[in-house]
Image (cartoon, helix red, strand yellow):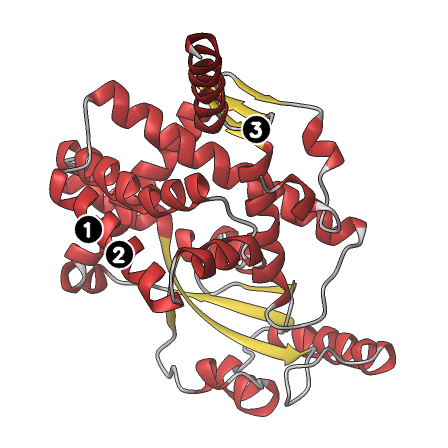
Amino acid sequence: MLKKTALLLCLLLALAALAACSPSPTAVAVGKNRVDASEYAFYLNYNRLRSEEGGEPEYGEAATAAARESSLNQIITNELIRIKCRELGLELEREQKELLRENKQTLIDSLGGKAAYLEFLRESALTDRAYDKFQENSLYYELLFDHIASEYAPSDEELRRYFAENYIMVKYIRIALIDELGEPLGERDAAERLQLAEDVLALAQEEGADFDLLISEYNDDVSMADAYEGLVLSRLEAEGAEYLLPAFELAVGEVGGIYTGSDGYYIIRRLNLGAGYFEENREYILQSAENHNFSRLLEEWKGETRIKTYDIIEKIDLGNLMEYVK
């Protein structure tokens, strides 16, 4: 009887040890941090859903490559932030941890119990441990950002230089590549729009051209139609719409194009952005500079940190990712 009890105890301890460990192999290593295949699969699914926006699932090479790139970038960023918080001794407050627990329990209760919660996780390509980690990520980001921002104090001259290098005012003409419902135009219509854009660009670059008149005649973007004085654009905003980035290379008064966005062809004229804007928006510009500084540091940390991807990520794709959620 004693032997049976001891054997049962050993078995229970072994099962407990197995339950405490992730059954999923490592997919990405960032420094000493390890991210398993299950978490990587979640990010693939997360980025697929974001790109589809309610449309039909896409499993092709382009969709997979885009999801892989976004997933890896997010994982690396999240792990770097945790590493830096650990190095700096930055920890979540007890109240924050308690709030996370309360929010989780509220979710479980709203779904109807633990079984429904586990089903919700499965449908979201999540494990319980990945859910907890995902909820913590934004808190660690804020913790590190606030710490870095508190130590970032640019002088007036430095802030003005940042403003001069990273803010411009523009007017533009958009020749749409989408219809009224937001659907892409057919090949023939798109070719006609390209020819129109080339013609408008030629008119806009003529000496003495009235760009405002051309906007009223050819622009089909109401955002520009309502901006009589022009639109102020930061480099950080332009990085989210790469067709706008070339405008930063234009001289004041110069017209450039054709820049291709997902929604149309753009012809852009750079305008003079006076010092008055800086004075009126100093606080906002400082916040922008803090974001820029934090992004710069993240890129530096990426270059300084050993990052390794494992072969298993090549086996996980948009069609089979649920097999790795365990």
- Residue for point 55% across, 53% down: 122
| 131 or 119, nearer to the observer | 119
The numbered mark, 3 or 1, whose residue comes first in the sequence reads 3
Numbered disc in front, either 3 or 1: 3
Q: Label 1, secondary structure: give it.
A: helix
Q: CA distance from mark 3 to mark 1?
A: 28 Å
- Image coordinates of residue 284 in percent, x first then y, are 21, 57
Is 142 displayed left or right of 115 in the figure?
left
Q: Are marks 1 and 2 in contact (CB under 8 Å)?
A: yes
| Amino acid carrying mark 2 in the image | Asn
In the rendered view, tell whether residue 53 sits above or below residue 101. below
| Amino acid carrying mark 3 in the image | Pro
Q: Does the rendering let one see residue 205? A: no
Rate crowding at label 3 as few (under 14), some (14 to 19) or many (20 or more) other CA atoms within 10 Å: some
| 58 or 62, nearer to the observer | 58
Q: Which mark is residue 99?
A: 1
- Residue for point 43% across, 35% down: 77
Q: Label 2, secondary structure: give it.
A: helix
Q: Which mark is residue 23?
A: 3
